[in-house]
Image (cartoon, helix red, strand yellow):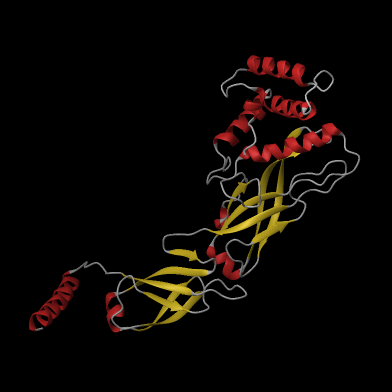
Amino acid sequence: MAEKTYYEILGVDKTADADTIKKAYRKLVRKYHPDVSKEPDAAERTAEINTAYETLSDREKRAEYDELLANPYGRNAGGNPFGGAQSGGFRYEYRGGEPFGAGDFNFEDLFAGFGRNQRHAHARPDGPIKGEDQHAELSIDIYAAYVGAERSLNLNVPTVDEYGRVGYQTKTLNVKIPKGITEGQQIRLAGQGLPGYNGGANGDLYLKIKFHDKPDLYVKNKKDVYQTIDVKPWEAVLGGKIIVPTAAGRLQVNLPANSQNGKSIRLKGKGIPAKEAGDLYLNIRISVPKAESEADRAAWAQLAAHFDGKSASN
């Protein structure tokens, strides 16, 4: 079940003005403050209320929070919470709750993690508490899986200080993409999750790999690569050896004679170079050159006459 938004915690509408939010906050604090309330969860409710009010009473924090709610894939072009991380074909999307469970990440889940840390702070535990792990989906170009890659990215993340107050911090993280990584594998960034409390260690950040598919280049079965290649009509008819630029590099391919549009050529072991490599499937697309001169049209007319005559004789 999804955590409540800050607006729901305070019982106000998203369009509520500052005075309405303040009145709602004061009313709830009087009701749930541990010194006066007999509710068993009074301390937790008070921590939630304080967290919600601290954000919604601050114009900049509220605007930022509203933006996160309205755009759960982040504030930057391309839809992600990672500032300036679009170069190199990388895209980052948070997921919350269970590690890479069903459903898209909701930024409310991320803020809820800080609410839980604040409840720990309010309870004043005796020992250190480890920060919660965070999970994200990392979309990479297929080419990166063939050769490996390393990227630096800026990540705007909420943080919690020693008093349980939420703030923001920009982190620069170095992410190594190992050669042969397959879709669904995880990369662990130690200590990059939520901060711990009372001297506890930070949680970890787990990145689940997803390939950035394109219509002419995509992955199936986690490591089998499908790529569309353009073939000239005479190459398709005559067949023979052709040089094809692929995700695996420039390869010499034996094209069967009379190859048809939409047919595939399988190159075993030329897919993602995992421990057990996937296969590369080359989908044939016959590319017809334009007739840009009288000589071109004459050549096509001669070809048409030849095959028309052949069909008539058959």
Tell me which residue sits at (60%, 72%) in the image. 274
Image spot of residue 52 (x, y percent): 69, 27
Image spot of residue 23 (x, y percent): 68, 14
Quarter occupied by the C terminus: bottom left
Q: On the rendered structure, is 151 left or right of 278? A: right
Tell me which residue sits at (83%, 34%) in the image. 121
The image quadrant of residue 252 is bottom left
- The image shows residue 95, relative to residue 14, as above or below, that is below
The image quadrant of residue 124 is top right
Image spot of residue 215 (x, y percent): 42, 60
The image quadrant of residue 296 is bottom left
Q: On the rendered structure, is 89 left or right of 216? A: right
Image spot of residue 167 (x, y percent): 73, 35
Tell me which residue sits at (74%, 26%) in the image. 50
- The image shows residue 93, relative to residue 126, as above or below, that is below
Quarter occupied by the N terminus: top right
